[in-house]
Image: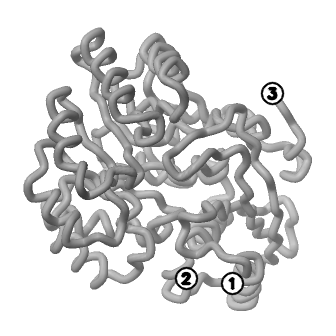
Amino acid sequence: MFATEIIPYTLRFKQPAGTSRGVYREHRVWYVVLRNNEDPTHIGIGECAPLPGLSCDYDNSYVETLNHFCQMLEERQMLESELLRRHPSILFGLETALQQYRQRSWQLLESPFSRGEEGIPINGLIWMGSFEQMRRQADNLLQRGFRCIKLKIGAIGFEQELELLEFIRKNHPTITLRVDANGAFALGEVEVKLQRLATLDIHSIEQPIQASQCEEMARLCDTTPLPIALDEELIGICYPEEKKRLLERIQPQYIILKPSLHGGISGCNEWITLATELGIGWWITSALESNIGLNSIAQWCATLGNSLPQGLGTGSLYQNNIPLPLDIRGDALWFNPSGSFPDKPLQAYETDYD
């Protein structure tokens, strides 16, 4: 038998993280701790990390909802996943807390990654900023050995963003380039912008137009000169029949899966099964979780056999991240099973700064 505890925590970014939706300076998350009633050292920790303005399950009653489902989990000693379909960030936190509780280890799933034998290839991420700020980010990532780079675009002006992409492509012709528009392109301009991006051998563009424009997105995916990946489009699509209907209608080239946004681990597994059946590619990305959530996503991702670079490089964003032996070597995320793990209450790390 276990009891549940909820620990609120504010993650603070080392530098403001800019997207077309705004700038993140801190991220409020909630850790769910399962603790054995007879052995207090036997615990499981999960992370509920919704993104305000983006997560379908975040509202003013989020904490009340989280308390309700934690109480239900404690009373039943089992997770009612079907009841949590419309609460993906809570589902992710609870299902991964249970997984760690059962394993009694941060090595959640067996794989070469969890044994510290292999890393997971990832893309380097360039956050929005001025042209010079973004160029310096690109230079830093390339010097560190990244072979796949993703740029968030849609804020400083398309011509400048195109100039930066042209600079990277000219000087690094073999680099894989991804871009993420976060829905920033207007319908009247998107086709021209896709054509111009396609001349730079772009691997894919995430969410070129805003979500919930199904007919327009389907038309774009049918005629696009470069692959389109859906991200925000998948948020709030919670049931298998809805997922299948969306993918069959739009027929994207890729989908990008974030457990905190897209149904937890179980819901993302449904997306993967449906996408595979329809010949749609996919990869996994974290959604600004701390190392607690990132570890859960990475441990799961490592078992899926996807050779594309994943989006799991956000663990170093925070001043007061929870210490776990996750680190980036070259362009891969690694886990060290013999490394250092949290050795004090989670709350004690909240005011830690690098």
Which residue carries the number 3 mark? 354
- The disc label shown at residue 117, or none: none
Question: In the rendered view, would you say 188 is above or below 118?
Answer: below
Q: Kindly indicate the quadrant of the structure image that contains residue 244.
A: bottom left
Mark 2 near mark 1, Cβ–Cβ under 8 Å?
yes
The residue under label 1 is which amino acid type? Answer: Phe
Quadrant (top left, top right, bottom left, bottom right) of the N terminus: bottom right
Relative image position of residue 279 (x, y in whole percent): 13, 59
Residue 22: horizontal and vertical position, in percent?
Answer: 58, 49
Verify CB contact (< 8 Å) between mark 2 and mark 3.
no
Q: Earlier in the sequence, mark 1 or mark 3?
A: 1
The relative height of residue 319 versus residue 209 in the rendered view (above or below) is above
Q: Which SS class for mark 3? A: loop
Question: From the viewer's perspective, is residue 303 above or below residue 236?
Answer: above
The amino acid type, in three-letter code, at marker 2 is: Leu
Tell which circle, 2 or 1, labels the residue nearer the N-terminal end. 1
Return the disc, 2 or 3, that comes first in the chain's sequence.
2
**Foreground tag (1 vs 3):** 3
For the residues bearing labels 1 and 3, Cβ distance under 8 angstroms: no
Q: Which residue is mark 1?
A: 69
What residue type is disc 3 on?
Answer: Asp
Left or right of 108: which side holds 145?
left
- Give the tally of numbered discs: 3
Residue at the image position 46 percent from the left and 13 percent from the top: 139
Question: What's the CA distance linking mark 1 and mark 3?
Answer: 34 Å
Q: Residue furthest left?
A: 223
Q: Residues within 10 Å of mark 3 (few under 14, many from 20)?
A: few
Quarter of the image for residue 280 reads: bottom left
In the picture of the structure, the residue carrying the numbered disc 2 is 84
Q: Is residue 122 visible?
A: no
Q: Position of residue 191 (x, y in %)?
A: 17, 48
State the residue at coordinates (69%, 84%).
69
